[in-house]
Amino acid sequence: MDFYLFKILKMNFTAIDFETATGYHPCSVGIVTVQNGIIVDEFVTLIKPPKNEYNPFTIRVHGIYPKDTVNSKSFAQVYPEIEKRLKNRVVVAHNESFDRNVLMKSMLLHGLNYEDLNIAPKWECTVKIYKAKGLKPTKLSDCCREMKIQLNHHEALSDARACAKLYMLR
């Protein structure tokens, strides 16, 4: 078995992507779990942001409207699904500081303790990885085009899946 294949087979991590309605209030989350280099679980859901309020700019980015989330679960109601996929795992995101802050601030808002997840204070970041490889620019769409990964950009599950694939190809 060559080293590259061996490296991929040892990969266990979870990739996550949030789409936001305003600031750090999520309106969608996509989570992809990789075990031994294979995607074994995918989760996506809409999330009703506080007061179901949106910034017009974010709607233009991801195409999610208040009418799409009016009957969706709140972050607190979705959190158990997030927790079971992230707890005790290596977590990866394309712009990790953004997604980590969305998670941390949403947890704080709902009285949930980030420390209980037992994950690294800083996650693995595919932006930093691909920037270090010399790729410019390093937007998710640019990295995916370069690495020939299919992407429906700003759809949370597609973004999380693409991030997982980028991480495996690093």
Image (tube, rainbow, N blue to C red):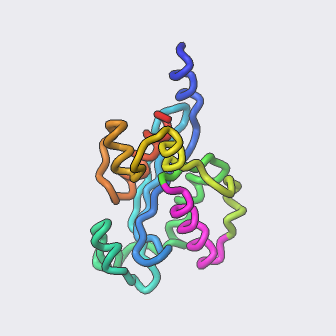
Magenta residues, as a range? Answer: 95-112
Position above or below: 5 against 19: above
**Does residue 90 appear to the left or right of 116 in the view shown?**
left
In the image, farthest residue toward the top: 1
Rendering coords of residue 91 (x, y %): 58, 50
The kind of secondary structure the magenta stretch mainly shows is helix
The N terminus: image quadrant: top right
- Asked if the stretch drawn in magenta spans residue 98, the answer is yes
Q: Residue at x 50, y 73 (%)?
A: 24
Whether residue 104 sits left or right of residue 138 in the image: it is right
Q: What is the x, y in percent for residue 124?
A: 58, 48
Tally of numbered tags = 0
* Residue 154 drawn in magenta: no
Tell me the residue at 46%/38% (across/down). Answer: 39
Across and down, in percent, residue 141 comes to 34, 50
Task: Tell me, yes or no, if residue 27 can be seen here.
Answer: yes
Front in this rendered view, residue 61 or 46: 61
Question: Could you say which is closer to the camera, residue 69 or residue 141?
Answer: 141
Q: Residue at x 41, y 65 (%)?
A: 19
Q: Is residue 40 visible?
A: no
Give coordinates of residue 67: x percent, y percent: 28, 78
> Considering only vertical position in the picture, is 50 above or below 87?
below
Residue shown at 64% from the left, 53% from the top? 87
Q: Residue furthest bottom?
A: 51
Q: Relative to the observer, which residue lies in front, 150 or 71?
A: 150
